[in-house]
Amino acid sequence: MSETLTERRAHDHRVVQELLDERRQLWSLLAALQRLQPFQAGQSLDSQVREFCQVLVDYISLGHFEMYPRLTDVPERRERVQALANRLYPQFMQATDAAVDFNDTCEGLTGEALTQSLGPDLARLEEALSVRFALEDQLIGAMAD
């Protein structure tokens, strides 16, 4: 059973809203981690980093597996939106890869190793997320037009 245009638009709106909610939560957790800097030996960061990584993975997954395919796989999607999505996809994937790399790195670290690695890793991730947010904003804007 295929979706009607109204159902597709309602679903798209829900996905975009969920993505923006996840993004706000992610940014809030990132800011909380950054306020703990400079990271020092003996500082317990494991639980905060695990929570952040869980939200990060949820956010990345939502954009990658839910929003992006809806932009490119729906045949009647406006050509302009599809063209933009296809043009932005390589940058989108770079940001996704950076987030996955951060998660994979942090998953394997605890204690002092995490403390030493976290500052530079967060800085790289923040840059990648900023790029991804801007790309998503372009796509969301194009969908709304």
Image: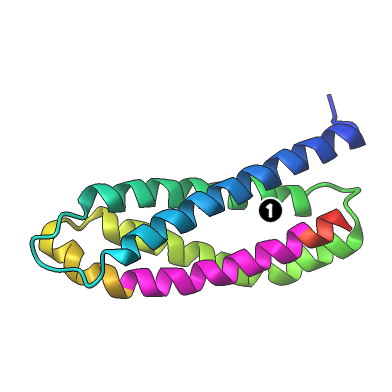
> Which stretch appears magenta?
121-140
- Picture quarter with the C terminus: bottom right
- Residue 22 location in percent, x, y? 54, 47
Q: Going 33% across and 66% down the picture, which residue do you hit? A: 34
Q: Which residue bears the numbered disc 1?
A: 68
Horizontal side of residue 19 vs 88, given as left or right: left
Horizontal side of residue 96 vs 38, given as left or right: right
Residue 82 location, quadrant? bottom right
- Picture quarter with the N terminus: top right
Residue 4 location, quadrant? top right
- Residue 143 location in percent, x, y? 82, 55
Q: Residues within 10 Å of mark 1 (few under 14, many from 20)?
A: some
Horizontal side of residue 34 vs 13, given as left or right: left
Residue occupying the far top of the picture: 1
- Residue 133 location in percent, x, y? 60, 64
Q: Going 80% across and 36% down the picture, which residue do you hit? A: 10
- Residue 88 location in percent, x, y? 70, 70
Relative to 38, is 136 above or below? Answer: above
